[in-house]
């Protein structure tokens, strides 16, 4: 199964999808051999979730990580609001 998953990942190398962009990100940090296994793990995880939930797969796109809001302040404000605190923006900005 591992060999088959790696072959499927290699087939996606020229496509513009989530798995191909995952391979590119992993290559920068870990190298070529680990990217194959990491991307194969992503593919198997996607297949498992499809089988578990019974829902069809929806491609998120190659730039789905850039579209997610990465602002830590907004995440912290939402967290504090969930905890019951009221947050008001201040006039001062600190560096």
Image (tube, rainbow, N blue to C red):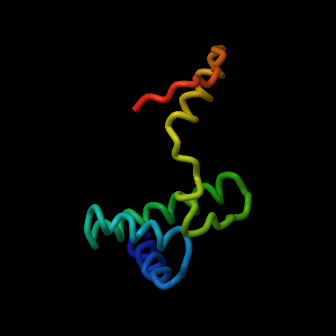
Where is residue 6 shown, x and y percent of the image? 41, 74
Whether 22 is drawn above or below 87: the answer is below
Q: Nearer the viewer, residue 57 or 85?
A: 85
Identify which residue, 38 or 18, lies in the foreground. 18
Query: Which of the image's four quarters has the N terminus?
Result: bottom left
Q: Toward which corner of the image does residue 85 lie, by quadrant?
A: top right
Extreme residue toward the front, this view: 91
Horizontally, residue 64 falls left or right of residue 34, namely right
Q: Is residue 50 above or below residue 75?
A: below
Residue shown at the point (52%, 46%) measured from the top left? 70
Residue lying at 63% horizontally and 20% vertically, measured from the top left = 87
Question: Residue 8's x, y, as percent?
Answer: 48, 78
Q: In which quarter of the image is the C terminus?
A: top left
Q: In this view, does 2 lie to the left or right of 53?
A: left
- Which of the 4 image quadrants contains residue 29? bottom left
Residue 4, horizontal then vertical, whole percent: 44, 76
Q: Nearer the viewer, residue 58 or 77?
A: 77
- Residue 56 at x, y = what percent? 72, 64
Q: In this view, does 80 lie to the left or right of 41?
A: right
Residue at position x 48%, y 85% from top?
A: 14
x 50%, y 65%: residue: 43
């Amino acid at each position: 199964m591992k060999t088959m998953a790696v072959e499927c990942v290699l087939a996606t190398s020229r496509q513009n999808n989530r798995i191909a962009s995952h391979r590119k990100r992993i290559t920068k940090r870990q190298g070529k051999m680990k990217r194959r296994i990491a991307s194969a793990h992503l593919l198997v995880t996607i297949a498992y979730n499809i089988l578990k939930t019974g829902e069809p797969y929806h491609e998120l796109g190659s730039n789905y990580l850039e579209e997610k809001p990465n602002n830590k302040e907004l995440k912290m404000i939402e967290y504090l609001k969930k905890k019951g605190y009221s947050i008001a923006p201040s006039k001062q900005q600190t560096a």
